[in-house]
Amino acid sequence: MSAVPLVAGDSDEALRAALQAIVGERGLLCGADMAGYEQGARYGQGRALCVVRPASTDEVSAVLRLCAARRVPVLPQGANTGLVGASSPDNSGRQVVLSLGRLRSRCEIDALDRSVAVDAGLTLQELNARLESHGLWFPVDLGANPSIGGMVAANTGGTRLIRYGDVRHNLLALEVVLFDPPGQVLRLGSALRKDNTGPDLKQLFVGTSGAGGVITQATLEVHPLPRQSATALVVPGSDAALGELLQALELELGDHLAAFEGMSGAAMAAAIDHVPNMRNPFAPEALPEFAVLIELEAGALASVTGLPLQDMLDRFLEAQFERGTIVNAALGHASALWQLRHALSEGARALGRVVAFDVSVPRSRIMAFRRAALAMLEAEHPHLRVTDFGHIADGGMHFNVIWPHEAVPAYDSEAVQDLRDRLYALVVDDFKGSFSAEHGIGPYNLRYYHCYTDPAAIALADGIRELLDPLRLCGAVDFGPDPALAACR
Ligand SMILES: Cc1cc2nc3c(=O)[nH]c(=O)nc-3n(C[C@H](O)[C@H](O)[C@H](O)COP(=O)(O)OP(=O)(O)OC[C@H]3O[C@@H](n4cnc5c(N)ncnc54)[C@H](O)[C@@H]3O)c2cc1C
């Protein structure tokens, strides 16, 4: 490995040649080969100068040294499943996309410590496949297969957050490569659970969309694989009853509660109509307006009552039927119910252009928020549809607004901007919620970071960035002040 020296002003060809000298022929993509790296999963599409695919931390370090010397911006990319436009290049054609997809050889499992040190490019499914034979898993669970580095940079949440927390909660240590000093490799934290020895600097790279450095390795806390699970899809008697059901579950079976996922009838209908192999789990009855997917988990012997977990859940649900907190339950195998849950995004996409709202509010107010948002849409944009679903127990809601392909009026970006301003104001001002619950910050929602973040916090973020990456070369997002993104209120 030897980097061709470069100075600012050298040609793009010279830069590509120098990058290839670091990563080898297989490690550099140009032209049409870059297509899959230039388009985001939901938002974002641009042009890259080239895609560089280092296979080791040393190669990442050499790439950053080279790009720092040449003042070339670098966009780290994992599996490119992010939903805020932060993993695809802009339209300048000047960014080097640094894909971590080949950095995947290390996966050191310590079963007794319940930790794993893993390269950033390994995917979640690959990690879980390797953990399985040790009776372990990394339970941040979602309907995509992201890379571990991308999950750290996005601080991924998912469907089991109430039981296991988000990525931040399960992160023990990080290895990061910096732009300043160029190419410096920083190792932060350790596999220790107790290590109170100063500021927790690894958090600077969690949920910050690659701003400030490239994550090359993570050490994660992993968990025993559940040996029993029990699943049910139920219809709450009312909005208030949904809250009562959740409280009763936590009081009576809280040790086992792993998921409490809300799904609107509209979201289920879109998936059933447009995603192969989906069926209405309430058939022959119609879909309800709103249902909740409940999952309990336990070890092989664990059970509060001595009953198998599914019997415990059934007994609990019978009592809830009698109390009226639930009025119906679906039939269906757990895997079919989860397939339906994970097909909701695809179903929404089939209906039209999705205007996504990944928001959270205090969970005590989540159904009130839903009613208020639906009423606002009905009054102001009756031609739009909503296919919402959410992680109800943690207050998270994917309030997906659909502009149907056949709608009149046709899609209008100014109207969408206005809708987004109004709906985020409802979330943040009226319901004291968050405009980005779990997908993080990217070009798609940066405007609202500037609307709703305290200027003092923006100034602090700017100071931190100045230390880590004074030339602002790394990532798609700068958390410092941006006069161009004027306040939206
Ligand atoms: C169908 C579907 C369902 C989803 N469900 C959920 C869900 O339930 N909960 C949830 O939280 N998210 C969800 N997501 C969003 C997404 O999967 C997560 O944000 C994911 O963790 C991103 O990981 P990635 O490897 O794809 O990262 P990318 O999309 O490649 O990148 C995401 C961000 O991280 C940065 N980045 C990536 N790798 C690195 C690195 N090594 N070092 C520094 N920065 C890096 C990128 O620059 C970008 O800013 C879903 C996505 C899809 C498509």
Image (spheres, rainbow, N blue to C red):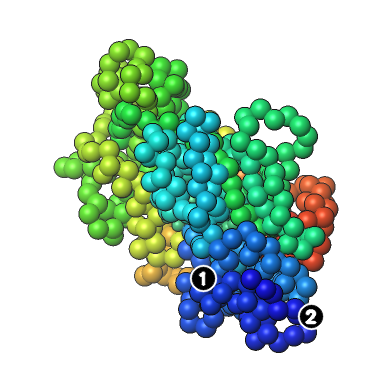
2 or 1: mark nearer the eye: 2
For the point 62% across and 29% down, which residue is it?
Answer: 193
Residue 240: x and y, percent? 44, 28
Residue 408: x and y, percent? 42, 70
Quadrant, the N terminus:
bottom right
Instruction: For residue 81, say whether it is visible.
Output: yes
Residue 402: x and y, percent? 43, 60
**As drawn, 138 above or below 439:** above
Instruction: For residue 245, say whether it is visible.
Output: no
Residue 302 falls in image quadrant: top left
> Camera-side residue: 385 or 2?
2
**As drawn, 71 above or below 397:** below
What SS does tag 2 mark? loop
309 sits to left or right of 372:
left
For the point 41% across and 24% down, which residue is it?
Answer: 256
Farthest residue, direction left: 284
Query: Which amino acid type corresponds to the residue marked 1 in the rendered image?
Result: Tyr
> Camera-side residue: 353 or 418?
353
Q: So how many labels did they put on this image? A: 2
The answer to which of marks 2 and 1 sits earlier in the sequence is 2
User: In the rendered image, which residue does mark 2 sit on?
Assistant: 7
For the point 51% across and 62% down, which residue is it?
Answer: 101
Farthest residue, direction front: 1
Residue 190: x and y, percent? 65, 38
Residue 359 shows which numbered tag? none
What SS does tag 1 mark? helix
For the point 73% across and 43% down, which residue is it?
Answer: 201
Query: Which amino acid type corresponds to the residue marked 2 in the rendered image?
Result: Val
443 sits to left or right of 271:
right
User: In the rendered image, which residue does mark 1 sit on?
Assistant: 37
Quadrant, the C terminus:
bottom right
